[in-house]
Image (tube, rainbow, N blue to C red):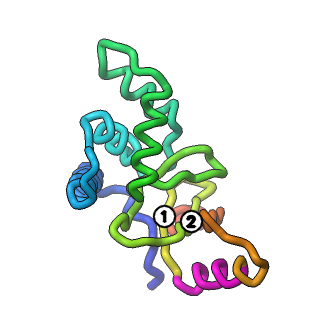
Amino acid sequence: MIESAFPELIHDHDQCVEEAVAVAVRICRERGSRFTELRRRVLEFIWTSHEPVGAYDVLNMMNAEKSTRIAPMTVYRAIDFLMASGLVHRIASRNAYVGCSHPDSCHSGQFLICRECGRVAEIEEDVISNALRDGAKHAGFDAVSPTVEIEGRCLNCRENLHD
C-alpha cells in the first residue's frame, strides 16, 4: 500500500494547530524571541487547514473576530517573523502560506500541491536537496531559498477519481 504524505482528510485538525503552537512556543523560547498573541493567532489561522492560506485571508479571519480592524502590514510582519523562525513556508505559486511540518530542522522545503483539493504536503528528500545545492554550486550560484513546488493529485483525489 502507498503511504500518503498528506494528512487524512478527516482528522483532529485542532490537534495539528495545538501541536504547531506548542512547537512555536518552545522554539521561540529557546531562541529568545517573542511569540506574541498576534503571532500565535496568525500561526493558528495559517494552520486552519492543510491548504495554503493567503495573507489577506488571515487578515479577514482576524478582523472577523476582532472589534478593531487590523492593518495588512501587521499581518505581513507577523508572517515575516513566522517565516524567519521556520514556522511557516511561502508557497510562491499560490502567493500563500502553509505551516511547517518540521520546524526543528533546517531544510529546503519541498511541497506537493494537489490540484484537485488544494492541500499541500511538505516532504524532505535529501536527494532532491543535495541535487539542488550541488547544481547551484556547480553553476556558481548561491541558492538562498531552494524551494520546490510540485503540482499533481494526492492519493485521496486519485482514488476518488476512480470511484
Question: Within 10 angstroms of label 1, few (less than 14), some, or many (20 or more) residues?
Answer: many
Residue 27: mark in rendering = none
Q: Mark 2 points at which residue?
A: 112
Check the image and report above or below for 84 versus 104. Answer: above
Q: What stretch is highlighted in magenta?
A: 126-135
Find out whether the residues at labels 2 and 1 contact each other: C-beta distance under 8 Å.
yes
As measured in the structure, the alpha-carbon distance from the residue carrying label 2 to the one carrying label 1 is: 5 Å
First in sequence, mark 2 or 1: give its number.
Answer: 2
Task: Describe residue 22's horizontal placement relative to residue 128 as left or right.
Answer: left
Check the image and report above or below for 127 versus 23. Answer: below
Q: Residue furthest right?
A: 139
Q: Which residue is drawn at 51% across and 58% down?
A: 120
Residue 101, percent across and down? Answer: 38, 64
Quadrant (top left/top right/bottom left/bottom right) for the N terminus = bottom left
Residue 8, percent across and down? Answer: 37, 63
Task: Describe residue 21's horizontal placement relative to residue 145 as left or right.
Answer: left
Question: Within 10 angstroms of label 2, few (less than 14), some, or many (20 or more) residues?
Answer: many
**Secondary structure category for the residue under label 2:** strand
Task: Describe residue 2's horizontal placement relative to residue 34 as left or right.
Answer: right
Task: Describe residue 83's horizontal placement relative to residue 21 as left or right.
Answer: right
Residue 85, percent across and down? Answer: 39, 55
Residue 121: mark in rendering = 1
Q: Main secondary structure of the magenta part?
A: helix
Question: What type is the residue that disc 2 sits on?
Answer: Leu
- Asked whether the viewer can see residue 15, the reply is no
Quadrant (top left/top right/bottom left/bottom right) for the C terminus = bottom right
Q: Which residue is drawn at 36% across and 21% down?
A: 64
